[in-house]
Image: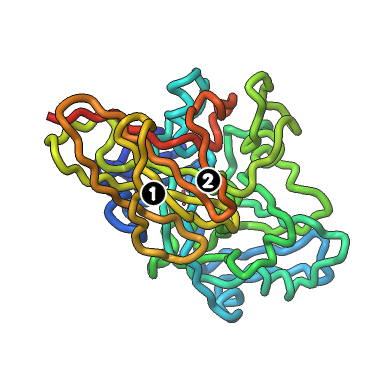
């Protein structure tokens, strides 16, 4: 074991704050990710929160500000959603191969995973607080001070009120049937399916109804898509929200040596937003020719699709590629150079793995 119950083969990008992803093959093994293989993305130390003393404050543009303990939340109707979380920095390594991205972790394909989240609908809490008509955004603020932020502050972010009221957005205290582990935001976190992981704020402290988006560092400066010639600064670029369509090869992993002949390839595709993965194509020759991959178990509209394909590989080097198509008929850009950006977010380019067969 490394820390926080993650196994010894976990790929650790940083110890403090703790940031880690599973080996690709572990992620490919099941559509519902076991807790031990669920990536961790932290911007500060994991706070020690006593569930019995924890209180959620709901305020800002509401008629009835609330302060709710865990037992108060649990008196509301329970709900569960199967949803994929994906960090905006997932697959940054592909962008880094094109050009340097100083100060950002070189995440591989494993900063994404899928779990069943159980809790209450945020919509029910918002209804109890009676949102005022001027409100357009819902901000979430965590209990973890982040030294990365300018100035140092608790992690936070916001989503539009329309999304916040949708039934899939939950305040979760359970993950895959277990109490939400401290490293994943226990006792309670927000889960905003279809949006970048950064909006699913862990160790939730406050929900604030606002006329404008959250003005904290992680909404105003970080987690924004910049043009290649822009530098991160407050208000520069566009705030990320819905995850961009992407797909990745998990097996065989990049650099693998396999026996020539029939090789089973596996990976994931995730559409983001309300879009669905409609089709996945795999190539064994760098994208010159393609075949359809088989889509595996459908865990519902907020989850990724794992896929598999049988490839016939002769001896030698092969560049495997994967590209997905979504329910809007969109597909992915071929080359990470086309989507390179100074913070290395939203790598929506084809998944690629160079392997050798002998
Ligand atoms: N309070 C708090 N919430 C947070 C973060 C954080 O550092 N602090 N990281 C965010 C980011 S960038 C991601 S991708 C997800 C990661 O969730 P996980 O660690 O449970 O996988 O949590 C989000 N929520
Ligand atoms: Mo993230």
The foreground one among 3 and 236 is 236
In the image: residue 284, left or right of residue 313: right
Which image quadrant for residue 208?
bottom right
Q: Which mark is residue 245?
A: 2
Q: Residue at x 42, y 65 (%)?
A: 299
Residue 247: x and y in percent read 43, 44
SS of the residue under disc 2: loop
The foreground one among 248 and 165 is 248
Quarter containing the C terminus: top left
Image color mode: rainbow
Above or below for 201 versus 285: below
Residue 130: x and y in percent read 79, 72
**Separation of disc 1 and disc 2 at Cα?**
11 Å
Q: Which residue is mark 1?
A: 268
Residue 93 shows in the view: yes
Q: Residue at x 61, y 71 (%)?
A: 121
In the image: residue 304, left or right of residue 163: left
């Amino acid at each position: 074991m490394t820390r926080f119950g993650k196994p010894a083969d976990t790929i650790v990008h940083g110890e403090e704050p703790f940031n880690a992803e599973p080996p690709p093959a572990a992620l490919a093994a099941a559509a519902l990710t076991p807790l031990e293989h669920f990536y961790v993305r932290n911007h500060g130390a994991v706070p020690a929160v006593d569930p019995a003393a924890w209180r959620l404050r709901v305020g800002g543009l509401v008629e009835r500000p609330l302060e709710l303990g865990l037992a108060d939340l649990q008196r509301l109707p329970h709900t569960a959603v199967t949803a994929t979380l994906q960090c905006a920095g997932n697959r940054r390594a592909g962008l880094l191969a094109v050009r340097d991205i100083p100060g950002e972790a070189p995440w591989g394909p494993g900063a994404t995973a899928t779990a069943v989240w159980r809790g209450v609908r945020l919509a029910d809490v918002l209804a109890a607080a009676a949102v005022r008509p001027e409100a357009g955004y819902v901000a979430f603020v965590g209990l973890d001070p982040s030294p990365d932020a300018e100035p140092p502050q608790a992690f936070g972010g916001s989503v539009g009120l329309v999304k916040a009221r949708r039934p899939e957005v939950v305040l979760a205290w359970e993950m895959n049937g277990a109490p939400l582990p401290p490293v994943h935001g226990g006792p309670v976190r927000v889960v905003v399916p279809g949006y970048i992981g950064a909006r699913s704020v862990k160790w939730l402290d406050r929900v604030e109804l606002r006329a404008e988006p959250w003005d904290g560092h992680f909404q105003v400066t970080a987690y924004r898509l910049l043009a290649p010639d822009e530098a991160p600064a407050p208000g520069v670029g566009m705030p990320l929200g819905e995850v961009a369509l992407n797909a990745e090869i998990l097996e065989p992993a990049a650099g693998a040596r396999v026996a020539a002949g029939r090789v089973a390839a596996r990976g994931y595709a995730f559409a983001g937003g309300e879009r669905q993965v409609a089709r996945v194509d795999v190539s064994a020759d760098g994208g010159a020719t393609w075949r359809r991959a088989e889509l595996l178990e459908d865990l519902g509209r907020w989850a990724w699709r794992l896929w598999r394909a049988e490839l016939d590989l002769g001896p030698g080097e092969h560049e495997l590629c994967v590209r997905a198509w979504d329910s809007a008929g969109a597909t992915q850009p071929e080359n990470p150079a086309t989507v390179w950006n100074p913070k290395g977010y939203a790598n929506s380019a084809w998944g690629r793995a160079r392997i050798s067969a002998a």
